[in-house]
Image (tube, grey):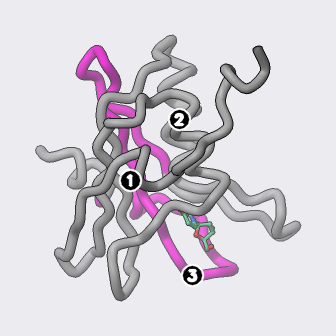
Amino acid sequence: MDLIDHARAVRENAHAPYSKFKVGAAIKAASGNIYTGCNVENVAYPEGTCAEAGAIAAMCAAGEYEIAEIAVIAGSPTPIPPCGGCRQKIAEFANAAVPVTLATTQGESSVTSVAALLPGAFDASHMA
Ligand code: THU
């Protein structure tokens, strides 16, 4: 099963009654283990969380902190770009070259990288 298939499967579990926009994310960690997450909305809208954040939380909860690959899928007309906050969250655990696969449920996909998604990222070196 490809990483995007894991994202496609977990997307079904999204809690998105407000936007009706379900998103799934899957991470392959450095160990090869796979962690998944879906968006979880809340009636108090800002309390909702993105699929990527859920997958990152699952990875950390398992004691892993290095993303080797990440895939995101939604029922969008074009492959879904992660929101700005999620780009920063991904960059926390992934080096610049890590591939990010963006896909639609209709089968369109594209591959980009952490560096391309978040150029000029704020990182720990800026606090030296
Ligand atoms: N969403 C994600 O889960 N990931 C993204 O990268 C973009 C947006 C979710 C948040 C919200 O539940 C819904 O999609 C609509 O914005």
User: Is ligand 1 within 8 Å of the beta carbon of the residue shown at mark 3?
Assistant: no
Lower position in the chain sequence, tag 1 or tag 2: 1
- Seen in the picture, residue 51 relative to 91 is either above or below; the reply is below
Q: Secondary structure at mark 2?
A: helix
**Disc number for residue 56:** 2
The quadrant of the image that shows the N terminus is: top left
Three-letter amino acid code at disc 3? Answer: Lys
Instruction: Tell me the amino acid under the disc marked 2.
Output: Ile
Left or right of residue 41: residue 82: left
Question: Dot 3 lies on which element?
Answer: loop
Q: Quick check: marks 1 and 2 in contact, CB under 8 Å?
A: no
Q: Say which quarter of the image contains residue 43.
A: bottom right
The residue nearer to you, when weighing 15 against 83, is: 83
What's the residue at 49%, 40% (across, down)?
A: 55
Crowdedness near tag 1: few (<14), some (14–19) or many (≥20) residues, C-alpha within 10 Å: many
Which label sits in the foreground, 2 or 3? 2
Which residue is disc 3 drawn over?
Answer: 20
Point 82% across, 57% down: residue = 47
Specify the label residue 10 is tagged with: 1
Q: In which quarter of the view is residue 122 placed?
A: top right
The range drawn in magenta is 8-37
Please check the rendered image and state whether residue 9 is part of the magenta-colored stretch, yes or no.
yes
C-beta proximity under 8 Å, tags 3 and 1: no
